[in-house]
Image (cartoon, rainbow, N blue to C red):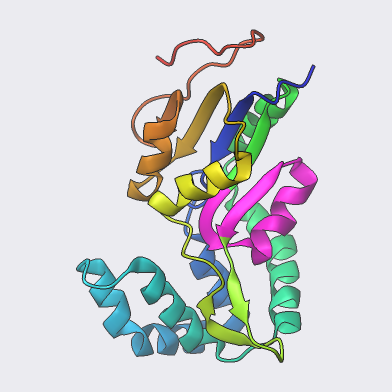
């Protein structure tokens, strides 16, 4: 029986995937020379973000603007389809795929909460039965060209918990599981009843009961 009062929120990059999927997406889309040139053009923002002088979202947008230019929505959607079919499956950790399927088998709602673009994450998540994909979204102008900005704030850190609260609105979960791997997942982990951060112990067990068992 489905128990919608239990939610499992998964970060993607480094948690479900083995690496930063955005870098792989950009590189396979525009090619290595343009990828490197884009990184060089965006280096003032990227370095500023590394030194915590520039917002991470601002730096990421500058990098994507330098690499993609005014690429159209149609072009980027085609790029995302190709990436999701040809490259993304090889980046997925089997044990995390198994874990999200366990949550589905228990009837829990599962949600992907990621700073990477929903452009390709939604394609990957749809056949796996995710209830929602909360992610960074690219902005497009009236001619459907990428503006070089984001439609909403970069889905990282505090923005992740804001997106979750917006998604569940007035009906927060009775039990919240969170799976992450970095500082960007801290706020979600602090809100969780059961949080697992990669590198900080084994996955917590799940039981057939409505309430999960304690993490070890």
| As drawn, 132 above or below 215 | below
| As drawn, 46 above or below 131 | below
- Quadrant showing the N terminus: top right
- In this image, 15 relative to 146: left or right? left
Identify the residue at image location x=58%, y=32%: 8
Q: Is residue 143 visible?
A: yes
Residue 216 occupies which quadrant of the picture?
top left
The percent coordinates of residue 46 (x first, y second) are: 31, 76
Q: Is residue 31 visible?
A: no
- In this image, 183 relative to 214: left or right? left
Q: Count numbered badges in the picture.
A: 0
| As drawn, 69 above or below 98 | below
The percent coordinates of residue 59 (x first, y second) are: 37, 75
Is residue 117 found inside the magenta-colored segment of the image? yes
The residue closer to the viewer here, 48 or 28, is: 48
The percent coordinates of residue 161 (x first, y second) are: 46, 45
Is residue 46 found inside the magenta-colored segment of the image? no
Identify the residue at image location x=39%, y=82%: 39
Residue 54 occupies which quadrant of the picture?
bottom left
| As drawn, 8 above or below 17 | above
The residue closer to the viewer here, 92 or 214, is: 214
- In this image, 104 relative to 21: left or right? right
Range of magenta residues: 113-135
The percent coordinates of residue 41 (x first, y second) are: 37, 90
């Amino acid at each position: 029986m489905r128990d919608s009062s239990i939610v499992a929120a998964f970060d993607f990059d480094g948690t479900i995937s083995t690496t930063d999927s955005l870098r792989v997406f950009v590189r396979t889309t525009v090619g290595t020379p343009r990828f490197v040139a884009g990184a060089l053009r965006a280096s003032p923002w990227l370095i500023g973000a590394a030194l915590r002088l520039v917002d991470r979202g601002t730096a990421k947008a500058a990098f994507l603007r330098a690499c993609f230019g005014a690429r159209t929505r149609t072009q980027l959607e085609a790029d995302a389809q190709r990436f999701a079919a040809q490259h993304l499956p090889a980046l997925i950790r089997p044990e995390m795929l198994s874990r999200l399927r366990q949550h589905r088998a228990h009837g829990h709602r599962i949600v992907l909460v990621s700073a990477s673009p929903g452009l390709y994450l939604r394609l990957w998540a749809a056949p796996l039965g995710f209830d929602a994909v909360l992610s960074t979204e690219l902005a497009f102008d009236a001619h459907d060209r990428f503006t070089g900005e984001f439609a909403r704030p970069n889905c990282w850190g505090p923005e992740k918990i804001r997106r979750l609260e917006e998604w569940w609105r007035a009906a927060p979960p009775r039990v919240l599981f969170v799976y992450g791997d970095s500082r960007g997942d801290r706020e979600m982990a602090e809100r969780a009843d059961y949080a697992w951060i990669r590198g900080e112990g084994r996955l917590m067990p799940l039981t057939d009961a409505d309430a999960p068992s304690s993490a070890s």
